[in-house]
Image (spheres, rainbow, N blue to C red):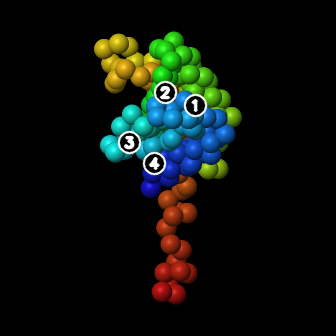
Amino acid sequence: MTSRFLLCALRDRLTAELAARPFPAARGAARPARVYLHGLPRELEEACYPFVVLRWSGGEVASEADHRVVLRDSVALALGVYSPDSQEEAGLLLAELLDLLRRILWTTRLLADRFVLEEPLKAAIPGPRERWNEYHLATLQTSWNYVWPPLTALAPSSASVESV
């Protein structure tokens, strides 16, 4: 449930932070970027722009020297913007959204009082052979760590077992 909680907390945080910053939409006036988990809804098609898709991309569990158990999860963010004016404008809007998200993530290095953003925060724009469509897209790769509580803290106490 920890990875699920991370994704939902990140979605909620980004949705709240992006609400005050509208970007041009494919159909009509500007609106805040929508935040989705794992993919775009099929029924929206191009009306989904601008968007941020959060996708769990990997993780590991490791024991530290002090016997703590540390969980590391990687979450990829895919960003998409649209500009009816030009590809140049779309590229500039994408750079603006990347800057905004990097700033939000960097200032929110502690998420939900348990997940810590690890350095570095990597950003990239897919090359021409990798791009998904004609609109401008980019990715951010994040890594978060979380220390699991000791197993003894998770086990029921003998008093609670006896009282049941």
Element on which disc 2 rests:
strand
Residue behind mark 1:
23
Which numbered mark, 4 or 1, is in the foreground of this view? 1
Q: Residues within 10 Å of mark 4 (few under 14, many from 20)?
A: some
How much space separates mark 3 and mark 2, taking CA atoms?
14 Å
Image point 55% across, 55% down: which residue? 149
Q: Nearer the viewer, residue 46 or 138?
A: 46
Position of 35 compared to 108: left or right?
left
Q: Residues within 10 Å of mark 2 (few under 14, many from 20)?
A: many
Q: Residue lying at the far front in this picture: please name it.
A: 28
Residue behind mark 4:
3
Element on which disc 3 rests:
loop
**Residue type of the residue flagged with mark 1:** Phe
Image point 61% across, 50% down: which residue? 112
Residue behind mark 3:
44
Q: Is residue 115 visible to us here?
A: no
Element on which disc 1 rests:
strand
Of the image marks 4 and 3, the number of the one nearer the N terminus:
4
Residue behind mark 2:
81
127 up-or-down from 57: above or below: above
How much space separates mark 3 and mark 1, taking CA atoms?
17 Å
Of the image marks 4 and 1, the number of the one nearer the N terminus:
4
Of the image marks 3 and 1, the number of the one nearer the N terminus:
1
Element on which disc 4 rests:
helix
1 up-or-down from 7: above or below: below
How much space separates mark 4 and mark 1, taking CA atoms?
29 Å
Q: Residue 14: give x, y in percent of width and height.
A: 58, 41
**Residue type of the residue flagged with mark 4:** Ser
Q: Is residue 23 visible to us here?
A: yes
